[in-house]
Image: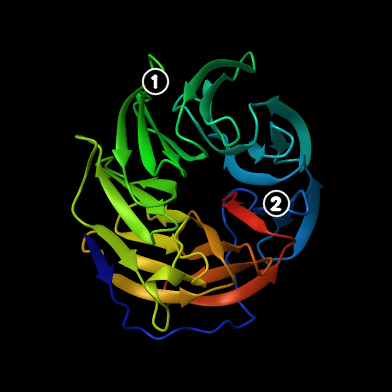
């Protein structure tokens, strides 16, 4: 059964000015553009400082632990590009299986777990040798990947099978298949590690998995902004605050981000953003959230104090992911 979460707060409109405090690190914002084959770099004033040409179709991005390198999955060239954050240049690439989409590091960064969309496998790459050491069969079109903090278990979604696969990392075996909604996409893990949230794009649902039992916890959730229908909502990207109190959920073609009380699942605010809100990331101080809008070719900046959109910035063709070096 779904539990529909009603929204009572009004839509907000975008305005075009904001003052941003300087952050630790470079403060740079990185956006991957699928169709213009680049990572766009913005400074703290949201001016574009560089367009880094990458391999074709850059999508998911992650920093290494000390944020000296940015790794970018490039789906049409079957590589993960490596960008030096200091020089803003591509300095290396790691070969993968066909069509890498989403990836995650092991906690010690010795292995890379990559969902290869075209061959329905979760690939594990040894970072020292750059050699694939495991190919774990999944359902068709795997996407979301998450490795637990202890490094013992990995989770991967299959968009076509409507499943979350539970993988024992030591053996490389799928130990359980969890049936969820239609076209599961991404994960977030609560800070205490107890809940794994799964976005299911085409059934407009969020499922919550109890990581202790790998069972679905409670009813599925759906978040519908005022004026939209359930079928308009296509949730994908998520972010969670460090204290686990709030979840940000991008609602895809509903063109909103829901800010949710993680404990009660109540909507604190629906924020109007660009077209097809896809990925979302929080600044380190959690004063700002950044949303990649795939069909309006921009990112939206959300002020977390007022829970409102404060700026829209054109970045390039079909932005997929956004990450912040702060």
Image quadrant where residue 20 sits: bottom right
Q: Is residue 154 left or right of residue 299?
A: left
Relative to 42, say whether 113 is above or below: above
Give me the residue at 57% from left, 34% from top. 64
Question: Counting other residues with Cα less than 10 Å from the Cα at mark 2, is it few (<14), some (14-19), or many (20 or more)?
Answer: many
Image quadrant where residue 83 sits: top right
Relative to 236, say whether 232 is above or below: below
Q: Is residue 262 visible?
A: no
Residue 283 location in percent, x, y?
Answer: 51, 57
Quarter of the N terminus within the rendering: bottom left
Relative to 1, say whether 118 is above or below: above
Image quadrant where residue 41 sits: bottom right
Residue 246 location in percent, x, y?
Answer: 33, 61
- Number of numbered discs overlaid on the protein picture: 2
Secondary structure at numbered mark 1: loop
Q: Any mark on residue 54, and which?
A: none
Residue 287 location in percent, x, y?
Answer: 47, 65
Q: Is residue 185 left or right of residue 14?
A: left
Q: Nearer the viewer, residue 89 or 321?
A: 321
Give me the residue at 57% from left, 37% from top. 117
Question: Counting other residues with Cα less than 10 Å from the Cα at mark 1, is it few (<14), some (14-19), or many (20 or more)?
Answer: many
Question: Where is mark 1, residue-wise?
Answer: 169
Q: Tell me how the rendering is colored.
A: rainbow
Question: Where is mark 2, residue-wise?
Answer: 34
Secondary structure at numbered mark 2: loop
Q: Is residue 182 visible?
A: yes
Q: Nearer the viewer, residue 144 or 46?
A: 144
Q: Is residue 36 left or right of residue 173?
A: right
* Callout 2 touching callout 1 (CB < 8 Å): no
Which sits earlier in the primary sequence, circle 2 or circle 1? 2
């Amino acid at each position: 059964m779904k539990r529909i979460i009603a929204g009572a707060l009004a839509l907000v409109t975008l305005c075009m000015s904001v003052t941003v405090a300087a952050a630790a690190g470079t403060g740079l914002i990185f956006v991957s553009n699928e169709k213009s084959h680049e990572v766009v770099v913005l400074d703290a004033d949201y001016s574009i400082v560089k367009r880094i040409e990458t391999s074709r179709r850059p999508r998911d991005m992650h920093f290494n632990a000390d944020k000296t390198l940015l790794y970018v999955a490039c789906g049409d060239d079957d590589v993960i590009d490596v960008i030096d954050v200091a020089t803003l240049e591509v300095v290396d690439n790691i070969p993968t299986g066909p069509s890498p989409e989403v990836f995650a590091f092991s906690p010690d960064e010795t292995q890379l777990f990559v969902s290869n969309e075209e061959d329905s496998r979760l690939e594990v790459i040894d970072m020292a040798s750059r050699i694939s050491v495991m190919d774990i069969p999944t359902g068709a079109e795997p996407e979301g990947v998450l490795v637990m903090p202890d490094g013992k278990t990995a989770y991967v979604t299959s968009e076509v099978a409507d499943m979350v696969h539970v993988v024992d990392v030591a053996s490389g075996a799928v130990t359980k298949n969890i049936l969820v909604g239609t076209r599961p996409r991404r994960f977030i893990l609560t800070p205490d590690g107890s809940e794994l949230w799964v976005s299911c794009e085409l059934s407009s649902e969020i499922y919550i998995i109890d990581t202790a039992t790998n069972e679905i916890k409670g009813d599925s959730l759906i978040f519908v902004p005022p004026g939209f229908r359930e079928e308009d909502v296509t949730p994908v990207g998520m972010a969670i605050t460090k204290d686990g109190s709030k979840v940000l959920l991008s609602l895809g073609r509903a063109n909103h981000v829901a800010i949710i009380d993680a404990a009660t699942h109540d909507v604190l605010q629906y924020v109007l953003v660009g077209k097809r809100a896809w990925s979302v990331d929080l600044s380190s101080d959690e004063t700002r959230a950044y949303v990649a809008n795939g069909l309006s070719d921009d990112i939206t900046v959300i002020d977390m104090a007022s829970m409102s959109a404060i700026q829209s910035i054109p970045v390039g063709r079909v932005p997929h992911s956004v990450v912040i070096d702060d």
